[in-house]
């Protein structure tokens, strides 16, 4: 079965960087993109961007443009998200999610069909 | 960016009730609208794509409708496992954006 397993919780100081990993199993890794969504305490889900697993092309939210990098290691079936210059308002649960593109009656629709369990990143001095 | 607004932000209902959640987009997104369910402490779970197409394995008591800027998620005969927070998400254009969520609580 499809699984996305993320790395564990992290505690970081302001100004530091964090890298979260997302290991995929149960499907051919290079078939689907992996995107990242975060959720601050009591807040809505917030899309950060993602990476194509086949060609490493990335798509970033403007909000994080200069601070986030998405990479992947196809040999390890793992995607990574690195966020730099951390601030207290980056405290959140970070999720990876697989992007599925469905084709119905000539149209195409994308959605996040499988999600990792989430990785809590706490930024505190 | 396309803003997604959900209403209500929370509601109380009983097992067996019919529940309707509304999601409005700040501009037309055709039917590029997804719904997710998030139980407390868990990752979101995909329910519906293309506004009204049920994901495989999702019970038929869930249904979605709408196009353009107004969408609804309906849960017929609410079950105990349905008490959760529901989010809409537009996939019409980047950046992908989510609604603020609707928490369905037990009355």
Image (cartoon, rainbow, N blue to C red):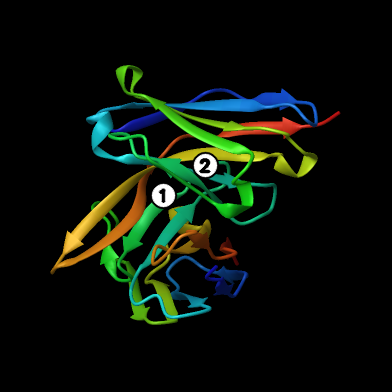
Outermost residue toward the top? A75
State the quadrant of the N terminus of chain A.
top left
Quadrant in the rendering for residue A111 = bottom left
Mark 2 and mark 1: Cα distance apart in space: 9 Å
What residue lies at 76% left-to-right and 33% top-to-bottom?
Answer: A123
Q: Quadrant of the C terminus of chain A?
A: top right
Of all chains, the one bearing label 1 is B
- The answer to whether A40 appears left or right of A113 in the picture is right
Give the residue number, with chain letter if any, for mark 2.
B42
Label 2: how many residues lie within 10 Å, few (<14), some (14-19) or many (20+)? few
Callout 1 environment at 10 Å: few (<14), some (14 to 19), or many (20+)?
A: some
Residue ID at (57%, 38%): A94
On the rendered structure, is B12 left or right of B15?
Answer: right
Q: Nearer the viewer, residue A36 or A44?
A: A36
Q: Are marks 2 and 1 in contact (CB under 8 Å)?
A: yes
- Disc 2 is attached to a residue of which chain? B
The residue located at (23%, 62%) in the rendering is A108
**Residue that mark 1 sits on:** B45
Residue nearer the viewer, B62 or B105 = B62
Q: Is residue B1 above or below residue A96?
A: below
């Amino acid at each position: 079965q499809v699984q996305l397993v993320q790395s564990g919780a992290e505690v970081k100081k302001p100004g530091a960087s964090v890298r979260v990993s997302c290991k995929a199993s149960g499907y051919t890794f290079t078939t689907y993109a992996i995107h990242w969504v975060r959720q601050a305490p009591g807040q809505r889900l917030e899309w950060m961007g993602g990476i194509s697993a086949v060609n490493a092309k990335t798509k970033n939210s403007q909000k994080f443009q200069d601070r986030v990098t998405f990479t992947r290691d196809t040999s390890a079936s793992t995607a990574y998200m690195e966020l730099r210059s951390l601030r207290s308002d980056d405290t959140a649960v970070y999720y990876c999610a697989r992007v599925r593109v469905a084709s119905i009656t000539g149209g195409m629709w994308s959605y996040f069909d499988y999600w990792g369990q989430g990785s809590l990143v706490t930024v505190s001095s | 960016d396309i803003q997604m607004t959900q209403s209500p932000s929370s509601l109380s209902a009983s097992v067996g009730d019919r529940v309707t959640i509304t999601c409005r987009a700040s501009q037309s997104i055709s039917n590029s609208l997804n719904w997710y369910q998030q139980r407390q402490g868990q990752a979101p779970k995909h329910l519906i794509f293309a506004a009204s197409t049920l994901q495989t394995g999702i019970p038929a008591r869930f249904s979605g409708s709408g196009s353009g800027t107004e969408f609804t998620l309906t849960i017929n005969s609410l079950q105990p496992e349905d008490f959760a927070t529901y989010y809409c998400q537009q996939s019409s254009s980047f950046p992908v954006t989510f609604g603020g969520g609707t928490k369905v609580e037990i009355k």
